[in-house]
Amino acid sequence: MLRLAFALVLLPFAATAACRDLQFEAESYTVCEVTAAQDLRLFYAGPEGAYGSFNAVEEALAAKGDTLGFGMNAGMYHPDLRPVGLYIEEGVEKTPLVTREGPGNFGLLPNGVFCIGAGLWVIESLAYQAAPPGCRFATQSGPMLVIDGALHPKFMAGSDSLHIRNGVGTSEDGKTAYFVISNQPVNFYDFARLFRDKLGVKNALYLDGAISRLLAPEIGRMDAGFPMGPMIGLVVPRG
């Protein structure tokens, strides 16, 4: 496996993610803000195999006196829960970058990578391939929702392809990531516009649809459902 160098900025960790509901035009969403100063990680598998749920991740963290202050599914996966595309955990590349066009949302190019390193970044996959940053954790998904301030060229206003969707966008300075889940079915065009026109981010990445899930204890939310592959979580001390 390829071991990648990364830079980790040691800053005080805030207690939890800042989660809130918001309205954008006709749709309702929940957004959670996490900063680069917090202990944000990706989780896929432990010694006994794929975690598959927030509960399993929390059980693993409890042994070290920690828990999840926020959690969300973090990309697409195979039937055995293995990540689709690039997946990096603690600087180690577990699965490689995929840049070819293909079926489904993942292959609707351009797709992208969410990178946790010295900052928090959403990067288009070919740009990542050309100049990989130092990522402590990274997950690839697709399609990109917003690319350098432009909506994905294949999104259509008024599309009747409506699903619950979740994704992530990052601030230009890399200090903040915005994790969003729709509270009702929406199309790609409207979901992408939320990131660009409401949250003001220039790069945003779709994470998934049918299995979109959110753990947000501060607002009393813990979504249940089928087993998940990669998950993203904010690690905080147990109270």
Image: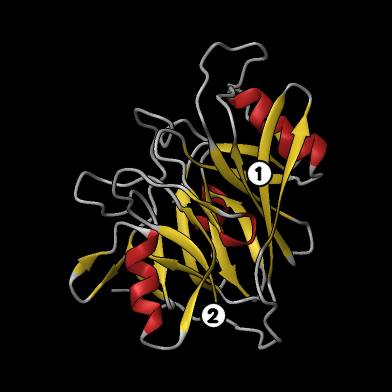
The residue at the point 73 percent across, 62 percent down is 176
Tell me the kind of residue under disc 2: Phe
Q: Dividing the picture into quarters, in which one does residue 190 lie?
A: top right
Tell me the kind of residue under disc 1: Thr
Label 1: which secondary element: strand
Rendered location of residue 120, percent (x, y) = 65, 65
- Could you give the CA–CA distance between mark 2 and mark 1, rounded to whole angstroms? 31 Å
Front position in the image: 66 or 123? 66
Nearer mark to the viewer, of 2 and 1: 1
- Tell me which numbered mark, 2 or 1, is placed earlier along the sequence: 2
Residue 30 - label: 1
Rendered location of residue 181, percent (x, y) = 58, 41
The residue at the point 28 percent across, 67 percent down is 45
Rendered location of residue 100, percent (x, y) = 38, 39
Label 1 packing within 10 angstroms: few (<14), some (14-19), many (20+): some
In the depicted structure, whether residue 230 falls above or below residue 76: below
Is the N terminus in the top left, top right, bottom left or bottom right quadrant? bottom left
Label 2 packing within 10 angstroms: few (<14), some (14-19), many (20+): some
In the depicted structure, whether residue 24 falls above or below residue 70: above
In the depicted structure, whether residue 69 falls above or below residue 152: below
Label 2: which secondary element: loop
Is the C terminus in the top left, top right, bottom left or bottom right quadrant? bottom right
Rendered location of residue 52, percent (x, y) = 29, 57
Q: Dividing the picture into quarters, in which one does residue 96 lie?
A: bottom left
* Marks 2 and 1 in Cβ contact (< 8 Å): no
The residue at the point 51 percent across, 41 percent down is 111
> Which colour assignment does the render follow?
secondary structure
Left or right position of 159 against 22 = left
Per the image, the residue denoted by label 2 is 6
